Every structure is written in C-alpha cells, then in structure tokens.
Image: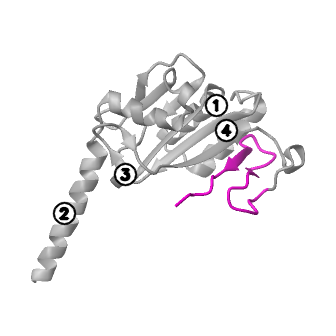
Amino acid sequence: MKNFITLIAVLIGISGFSQDKERTSLPVAIQIKTAVLAAPEDQREGAMVYGYSESGELEVLREGSNYMVCIGDDPSKEGIQVTCYSKKLEPFMERGRALKAAGRSEAEKRQIRAKEAADGSLEMPDAPSALFVLSGSEENYNKNTGDLKDGKFRYVVYIPYATAESTGLPIKPEAPGMPWIMDPGTHRAHIMISPISKN
C-alpha cells in the first residue's frame, strides 16, 4: 500500500510538472533573447520573433527589421528548441502552422503544401534559403537570463525541387557532419547539415 501511495504521489508530481510547463511562458524579453540565439549573431537584433502567450498561443513578440524570422521555445514541449529562418520561407512556414492549427496531420500538411506550391498559390523561395535550429536540455537553460549552455545546432538550406543531380549531394549522409539532400525533387527539398558534436 505504501508503494502504491508513493507511485500516486510521483504521478501527481509528474502531471503537475507537465501542466505547469504547458501553461508557463517566460517574459517577452527572455523569450526573444532565447529565440534569436539560433540566428547568426549579426542578424539577431533585427529578427522578427514569434513566442508564446500565457495561454500557449503563438504570437508575434517583436516585428523585425531584417530578413530573419525566429520562433521561440514551445513551453509545452520537453527540452529547449528555437529556430530562425529566412523570411523567404515564411509563407511555407506560416502555411504549415495554419494547417497544424486546423488539425491536419503531417502527411496532410505535406500533400496540401505540395499541391499549393505546384499550382503557385503557395509562394516558395526563389533562391537557397537557410533555417537554423538550436536545441538543448532544460538543465542547461537559464530561464532568468535566457542563456543556453551546450546547445546543439542543425542547419537546413531549402532549395525547392533540387535533386542529387542538380546539387551533387548524396541523399543520405555517408559520414558524420556530411551535408546531404532530403526530399529531393519536391517543393520541400533541403540540404541537411548536422555538425559533429564536440562532446
């Protein structure tokens, strides 16, 4: 019986943590500081930034003055992850967010955006466009300062409809850190680059 009570207490604690994480959003200044960590340093100050309201809704925290858009960490998800990308990708990204909000599955999102990109109703980049992803653990994140220690970067360069033949890149990495092309020949074709961890 004692073990059962202990188990219930642990489960309540986990549930409470989960609920607390879902409803907790950090101050706007901290969200912005963390979000722009994914961007190249010289592009951080003018980046447009999306973050999360107290109710968990994604909203614009800061209007930008350059060509970079950043998305803050989602407080309802485990770990820390922020992304920044070229404004040329915003129609594609925004459409994905809208479809997700409408309850569409990942497969449906891909199908719908593929059709819209093909018929021209979804604007896609007309040149290679970068996306930067920075992720890390909550243990290494200081929510009072917005700093993240030992974060890991991943880089993506979207080149719609590019192929292995047009880029000279393989369709899978053959060595650690090697760039490769994912979803070749499609509207979402992109180069993946995952730097080798120093740890």
Label 1 vs 2, first from the N-terminus:
2
Label 1 vs 4, first from the N-terminus:
1
Say above or below: 190 vs 62: below
Q: Is residue 11 visible?
A: yes
Residue 34 drawn at (x, y percent) = 41, 36
Residue at coordinates 63% horizontally, 52% vertically from top-left?
A: 195
Mark 4 against mark 3, which lies toward the viewer? 3
Residue position for label 2 = 12
3D distance between C-alphas at marks 1 and 3:
30 Å
Magenta stretch bounds:
171-199
Q: Nearer the viewer, residue 135 or 16?
A: 135
Q: Are marks 4 and 3 in contact (CB under 8 Å)?
A: no
Q: Secondary structure at mark 2?
A: helix
3D distance between C-alphas at marks 1 and 2:
42 Å
Q: Secondary structure at mark 4?
A: helix
Label 3 vs 2, first from the N-terminus:
2
